[in-house]
């Protein structure tokens, strides 16, 4: 299983995550920050659990590219 977490409040809206993993991220037209698709929010952290491991590489690229270091990708 793949677990992705986004600490959304610290997003600076650079768009890198959407560029490298468009199936996982969209930029919000409302506040300009990244939206982690299908995620659930808890205490400011947005988390999504995926069984599709084909998206692992794109999400790891997003984790590396994020200048705010607020994307965490874990494999369980
Ligand atoms: S790469 Fe990080 S800082 Fe940039 S839009 Fe995505 S979550 Fe926000």
Image: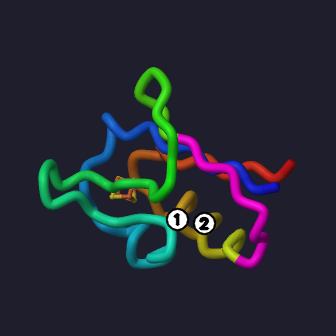
- The color scheme shown is rainbow
Q: Secondary structure at mark 1?
A: helix
The magenta-colored residue range is 47-54
73 or 36, which lies in front? 36
Q: Does residue 14 sit above or below 74 in this rendering? A: below
The Cα atoms of the two marked residues, 2 and 1, are separated by 5 Å
Please tell me in which quadrant of the rendered image residue 52 appears. Answer: bottom right
Taking the view exactly as shown, the residue that stands out farthest to the left is: 30
10 or 52, which lies in front? 52
Ligand 1 quadrant assignment: bottom left
The residue where tag 2 is placed is 59
- Residue at 57 percent across and 42 percent down: it is 47
Q: Quadrant of the N terminus?
A: bottom right
Question: Is the shortest distance between ligand 1 and the CB of mark 2 under 8 Å?
Answer: no
In this image, 16 relative to 30: left or right?
right
- Residue at 78 percent across and 62 percent down: it is 51
The residue where tag 1 is placed is 62
Q: Secondary structure at mark 2?
A: helix
Q: Position of residue 31 (x, y in %)?
A: 15, 48
Q: Is mark 2 in CB contact (under 8 Å) with mark 1?
A: yes
Q: Position of residue 22 (x, y in %)?
A: 44, 76
In this image, 54 relative to 67: left or right?
right
Q: Does residue 15 sit above or below 73 in this rendering? A: below
Q: Position of residue 35 (x, y in %)?
A: 36, 54
Question: Is the shortest distance between ligand 1 and the CB of mark 1 under 8 Å?
Answer: yes
Q: Position of residue 49 (x, y in %)?
A: 68, 50
User: What number is the disc on residue 42?
Assistant: none
Instruction: Characterize the local packing of mark 2: few (<14), some (14-19) or many (20 or more) Cα atoms within 10 angstroms.
Output: many
Please tell me whether residue 51 belongs to the stretch shown in magenta: yes
Instruction: Characterize the local packing of mark 1: few (<14), some (14-19) or many (20 or more) Cα atoms within 10 angstroms.
Output: many
In this image, 12 relative to 65: left or right?
left
């Amino acid at each position: 299983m793949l677990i992705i977490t986004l600490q959304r409040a610290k997003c600076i809206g650079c768009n890198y995550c959407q560029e490298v993993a468009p199936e996982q991220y969209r930029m919000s037209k409302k506040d300009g920050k990244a939206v982690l698709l299908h995620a659930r929010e808890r205490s400011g952290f947005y988390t999504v659990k995926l069984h599709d491991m084909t998206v692992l590489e794109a999400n790891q690229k997003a984790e590396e590219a994020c200048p705010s270091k607020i994307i965490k990708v874990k494999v369980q």
